[in-house]
Each structure stands twice: as C-alpha cells, then as structure tokens.
Amino acid sequence: MGRSFFLLFLLFLLFSALRAEVYSVDIRPSEWKGDRVGALRILDQKELVFDRIGRRRFAEISDLAFLKKRHWLFLISDEGKLFRFRARFGEKIRELSPLDAATLRKKSGKKLKKWRRDSEGLTIDGKGRLYVSFEEKPRIARIGYDGRIVRYLRLPRSIAKMGRFRSKNKGLEALAWHPKYGLVTAAEYPVKASRKGVQTLYALSGKLWNFRRDTAPKSAITALEVLDNGNFLVLERSFTGVLDPIVITLREVQIDRCRQGLCPVKVLARLDSGKGWAVDNFEGLAKVGPNRFVMVSDDNDNFYQKTLLIYFEVLSGK
C-alpha cells in the first residue's frame, strides 16, 4: 500500500511538473516561409501551461502589461486574478517565469463580488501605475501590484453606464496608456449611439477617435496599445461560430490623419485560421520595447484552447 501510494505521488509530481512550463510553438501555416506577415515580424512564440500560480488557477487571460524597469509582465484574467511574471525580451523571449498571483480586492482588502470581477483590460502609465478596466459594469480602476483597488476613475458620459452598450458582455474590453492623451479605452463593439460600422476609442479626458470597423464578420476590439509614432495599435477578433475560422487582425488607427470625424486605418496583419494560422482567442496586447509587443490568447478555461504568447515587431514604414 505504501509503495503504491509513493508511486502515485511521484506520478502526481511528474504530471504537475509537466503542467507548469513555457513551450515553444509555431502558429504559422506549415508552408509559411520566413518570419514576416504583413507589416509584422514574428520574433518568438510560446504556449503558457500552468495549472496554478500562487494557489490561483491560471486561465482565461484577457490582457497584459509590462513594467520595463522591473522586468515584470502582469497578466489579468477575466475572473479578477492578477499574475506577475519576470520577463526579459531581446530578439527572442529571453526569460518568462511566474513570480506570484493575487486576486483583485476592494480598497478595504475584501474580495470583489464575483459579478464585479470581470476584468478585461490592463495597462501601465508613464509612472508605473497599474490600471484595469471591467466589462459588465463599466469601470476603470487604478490598482496596486498586489491587486488592491486604489481608486475608480471617472468615465466619459458616453461609456459611463451599462445601458450605453449593446449588451452587458460588450463593454469596456481594451485599455491603453497614451503618453499624450493618458488612459484610452474601447468597447468590444460600437456603443448604441454609434453606427454599427464605426468603432470608437475614448480617452478619459474626453477626446475620442472614430474609425471604420474591420470588414471581417462580427469584428470586435479585444486589445489596444500605442505605437512609437503615437498612433494606436488595435487588436481585433472575428468569430462567428465554432465551425468557422477565427480571424485575428492587427490594425493601425492613424489619429494624426483624421478627417471629417473618421481616422484612417491601415491593416498591419491578418491571421486567418481558415488559411492555416493556428490562432486562438487573442485578447491582450502589451508594449515591451520600441515597436515591439506581445499578444496573449484567452483559453476560456477550455481543454481544447491554449494560452499563447506571441512576441512581434511592427515594422515602421511597411
């Protein structure tokens, strides 16, 4: 009995070890040559396989943010869990190892109720302060590195109430810090007051930018970042059904060239599972260097999906 228990224990430890790793993957079509796709250069590709980090289940990652001076990569799940990794980036991902995890909590230290933990966007400002956006009840909060909410920020009227959005699951999906305009957010789908074919980026200061929605069916904004030229990098996902292709599109919203209420948009890359790209539900973006970014996928806590981390460079002028 003792020997059998010992063998089972060893098997458990082995299984746990196999479930805690960062693996190299390749999402490119099998016949794809080189590392270029559109105006992007893919630098590295990883799958993150962790059962738990700091006793918290690692799943459903919705966004990330990078604190360069400390080499910390924060990842947020849509269940209000904040994970911290140590990360270094060069021509490849040089280091990516988990440090700890926390659960988002009120200023008092009490846990947020489950229906208030729907965190979707994450970003860091120029002073290293961390912010999170929530979807089902539109809120943006400054949080500590330990997940404790410092304060909630005031939202523009057009996105301040859930009734402004097309449904409770189509709220504030993306969040970014712009060095000139401050915190900028976006809804997954156009708000009720907008045309269905026009997306909008909202600065908390009140400024906004409109641009045409991507042509892919049911295209939705899932993440937002800022390019070195000051324009926005928008991550969009097209998903129409489990049997249909997933299309992931990265576009540049050229806010320096807006005319008559619309900003021009340039497609940087389009990754289509129907054309051999092994893409998943990409929902997060973080800037980690000059025009260098990582994007992460949400595995929906589903055995058949993966947490993928893709490191890429936007090639300026291409």
Image (cartoon, helix red, strand yellow):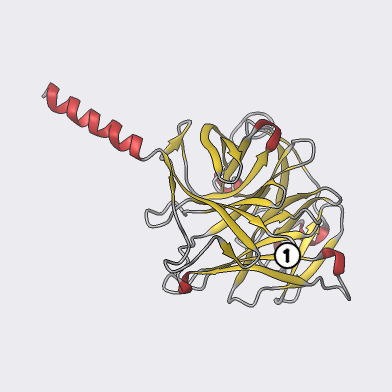
Work out whether residue 192 can be spotted: no
In the picture, measured across the screen, residue 297 lies left or right of residue 1, that is right
State the residue position of label 1.
Answer: 252
Residue occupying the far right of the picture: 260
Q: Amino acid at mark 1?
A: Glu
Q: Is residue 81 above or below residue 300?
A: above
- Give the crowd class for mark 1: few <14, some 14-19, many >=20 residues within 10 Å: many
In the picture, measured across the screen, residue 302 lies left or right of residue 140, that is left
In the picture, measured across the screen, residue 85 lies left or right of residue 306, that is right
Snapshot quadrant of residue 304: bottom left
Question: Whole-percent x and y of residue 62?
Answer: 57, 51
Q: Residue at x 69, y 61 (%)?
A: 234
Question: Whole-percent x and y of residue 45?
Answer: 50, 51
In the picture, measured across the screen, residue 118 lies left or right of residue 7, that is right
Q: Is residue 275 above or below residue 117?
A: below
Q: Is residue 266 above or below residue 155?
A: below
Residue occupying the far top of the picture: 2
Work out whether residue 140 can be spotted: yes
Q: Residue at x 69, y 56 (%)?
A: 224
Q: Residue at x 88, y 74 (%)?
A: 259
Q: Secondary structure at mark 1?
A: strand
Identify the image quadrant of the C terminus. bottom right
Question: Whole-percent x and y of residue 66?
Answer: 66, 41
Q: How many numbered badges does the structure rendering display?
A: 1
Q: Residue at x 13, y 24 (%)?
A: 3
Question: Whole-percent x and y of residue 227?
Answer: 75, 55
Identify the image quadrant of the N terminus. top left
Snapshot quadrant of residue 151: top right
Snapshot quadrant of residue 103: top right
Of 260 and 273, nearer the camera is: 273
Residue occupying the far left of the picture: 1
